[in-house]
Amino acid sequence: MYELTVIIPTFNEESNIERIISEVDKVFLQSGIRGEILIVDDNSPDTTIAIVNSLKKSKANLNLLVRLADHGLSQSVADGFAHALSEIFIIIDADLSHPPALIPMMYNEIKAGQDIVIGSRYMKGGGIKAWPFKRRIISLGGTFLGRTLFPRISDPVSGFFAVRKSVVAEAPLKPRGYKILLEVLGKGSWEKCREIPFEFVDREIGSSKLKFTTILEYVRQVLDIARFSFSLSQSAALREWKKVFMFN
């Protein structure tokens, strides 16, 4: 049994995959964490899968799940939840936009009692480096929509977060698009959530997979979570709003 699973969703990441695996494994060795690296790939037509299979020969803690249907980042992460061999998960991008060095801090926060730990770009100490103006505007708009559901969380659409298995084990997730964290927050079973700041660095190699259809999927996702939240008196979103109005 592993103490932690780092889930890395991939599609056509041949230029980055070996480096991200090496960086995460190095963090495990330096911190003494007995961790699994789980690559969840959407049947990449490039050499991503071949590279991972080659690396598996020398890394016993490296596992690969290849998905042949229903492709998408959120769907990949949700499948990773189901196949991970630990009770704590951390989701991180393959393109090194998220710093692997923060993995031990996130893991320790979960061990200390948090249910979800979010890497935030928008709290004090966080930021975004080398991002085009258009993507900044899209991100801010998406974050604003997410905060209508979770006003006390600065970055409810971050792609870099840690979560207990128990939070998502029975959650009726409908993963679509890129914002799996919002789905986890809206439908997962959790009480304690903490954010830690980090600086997002745009990918150096490869291209962004953001499309207009992704934005439409996100809007539908927000509406679906809102409907879910208002149908349950004990939903996480309603609980967070009550805390705002009660000034807690």
Image (spheres, rainbow, N blue to C red):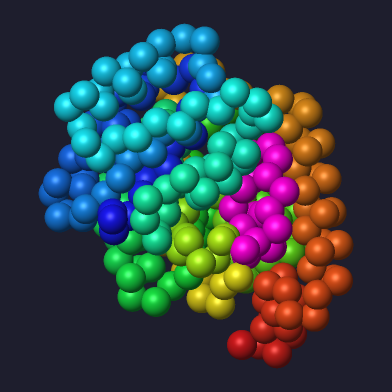
Which image quarter: residue 178?
A: top right
Residue in front for this viewpoint, 112 or 45? 45
**Image spot of residue 191 (x, y percent):** 56, 77
**Image spot of residue 37 (x, y percent):** 33, 40
Q: Is residue 57 left or right of residue 80?
A: left
Q: Quadrant of the C terminus?
A: bottom right
Inspect the magenta stretch and tell me whether residue 226 lies in it: no
**Image spot of residue 5 (x, y percent):** 36, 49
Question: Which residue shows up at 48% across the image and 70% down it?
Answer: 115
Say if residue 194 shows up in the picture: yes
- Establish if 164 lies above or below 50: below
Span highlighted in magenta in the image: 170-188
Q: How many marks?
A: 0
List the single residue furthest toward the top: 46
**Image spot of residue 233 (x, y percent):** 80, 80
Question: Which residue shows up at 75% across the image and 42% down it?
Answer: 218
- Establish if 247 lies above or below 41: below
Residue in front for this viewpoint, 154 or 88? 88
Question: Which residue shows up at 57% across the image and 72% down it?
Answer: 190
- Establish if 171 lies above or below 77: below
Say if residue 147 shows up in the picture: no
Q: Quadrant of the N terminus?
A: bottom left
Question: Which residue shows up at 63% across the image and 31% down it?
Answer: 72
Inspect the magenta stretch and tell me whether residue 173 lies in it: yes
Q: Is residue 54 left or right of residue 93?
A: left
